[in-house]
Image (spheres, rainbow, N blue to C red):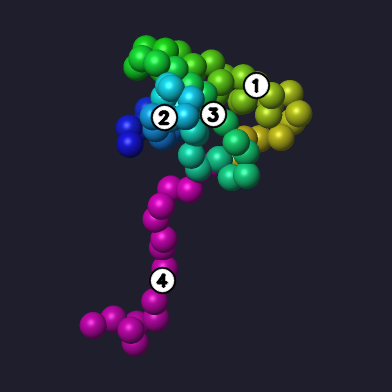
């Protein structure tokens, strides 16, 4: 699996034997599905930028902010009794 980034969003890239080209899916945007495809790295990067720009514009027009991706960290404050 390969990844690409654009505007702080990450896409995972897979090769689809069925379709005969690379397919990318933007991850970490909740229930929304944003995907694209291409045959070369340049095509994939261009398609990612295009689809993500359209997605963000669509969300802005609907006055519905895009879902943010999780940062992957968890913070907890423990009582002193749990400190070793």
Can residue 14 be seen in this snapshot? yes
Quickly name the residue at label 4: 77
- Give the residue drawn at x 41%, y 29%: 17
The N terminus is located in which quarter? top left
Numbered circle sitting on residue 17: 2
Where's residue 78, x and y in %?
A: 39, 76
Q: Earlier in the sequence, mark 2 or mark 1?
A: 2
Specify few, some or many for label 1: CA neighbours under 10 Å numbering under 14, 14-19, or 20 or more.
some
Q: In whole angstroms, how far apart are the C-alphas of marks 3 and 2?
A: 17 Å
- Give the residue drawn at x 41%, y 63%: 75
Specify few, some or many for label 4: CA neighbours under 10 Å numbering under 14, 14-19, or 20 or more.
few
Q: Which mark's residue is nearer the viewer, 1 or 3?
A: 3
Quickly name the residue at label 3: 35
Where's residue 18, x and y in %?
A: 47, 29
Where's residue 28, x and y in %?
A: 50, 42
Quickly name the residue at label 1: 57
Q: Nearer the viewer, residue 69 or 80?
A: 69
Q: Earlier in the sequence, mark 1 or mark 3?
A: 3
């Amino acid at each position: 699996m390969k990844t690409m980034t654009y505007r702080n969003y990450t896409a995972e890239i897979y090769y689809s034997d069925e379709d005969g080209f690379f397919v990318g899916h933007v991850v970490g945007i909740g229930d929304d599905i944003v995907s694209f495809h291409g045959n070369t790295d340049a095509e994939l990067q261009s398609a990612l930028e295009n689809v993500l720009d359209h997605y963000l514009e669509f969300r802005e027009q609907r006055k519905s902010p895009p879902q943010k991706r999780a940062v992957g960290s968890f913070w907890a404050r423990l009582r002193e009794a749990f400190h070793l």
